[in-house]
Image (tube, grey):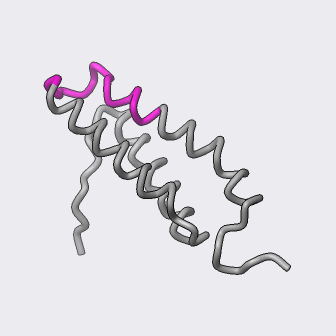
Amino acid sequence: MTSLIWLTAEEAAKNRGKVLSLYRQLLRSINSPKLQLSYASRLAKKAEVKTIFLFGSEEISKHNVADLIRTAEYALSQLKQGKIPNNTTQY
């Protein structure tokens, strides 16, 4: 029987490649010359990405993992356009 809410080992293994790819792409995208960031800002953004992925690696909820992947994909699309993703939510 598979779990409905919690991530199984097989599901985590399926996501591993995608998550590592997104992580690497985000770190590389922060170095893009399209982004007008100082060296210190680039290091701070990279530290932010590393922290998010570090805490995300401990997540076991299927829905939360899916949300983290969608958020990373959105952030990557913004970075590729030369935009810095907004970290505030507007209601």
List the single residue furthest toward the right: 1
Image coordinates of residue 43 in percent, x first then y, are 23, 31
Magenta span contains residue 87: no
In the rendered view, tell whether residue 84 sits above or below residue 24.
Answer: below
- In the image, residue 27 sits, relative to residue 68, either above or below, namely above
Quarter of the figure that contains the C terminus: bottom left
Q: Is residue 27 left or right of residue 89?
A: right
Residue drawn 48% across and 58% down? Answer: 68
Residue at 38% from the left image edge and 29% from the top image edge: 29
Point out residue 8 in the picture as x, y percentages from the top left corner. 72, 67
Which of the pair 86/43 is nearer the observer? 43
Left or right of 45 in this view: 76: right
Furthest toward the top, the residue is 33
- Image position of 61 (left or right of 46): right
In the rendering, at what x and y percent does residue 79 appear? 35, 36
Q: Residue at x 85, y 79 (%)?
A: 1
Highlighted magenta segment, given as a residue range: 25-39
Residue 27 belongs to the span the image colors magenta: yes
- Is residue 57 toward the left or the right of residue 36 in the image? right
Residue positioned 57% across, 72% down in the render: 61
Residue 10 x %, y %? 77, 58
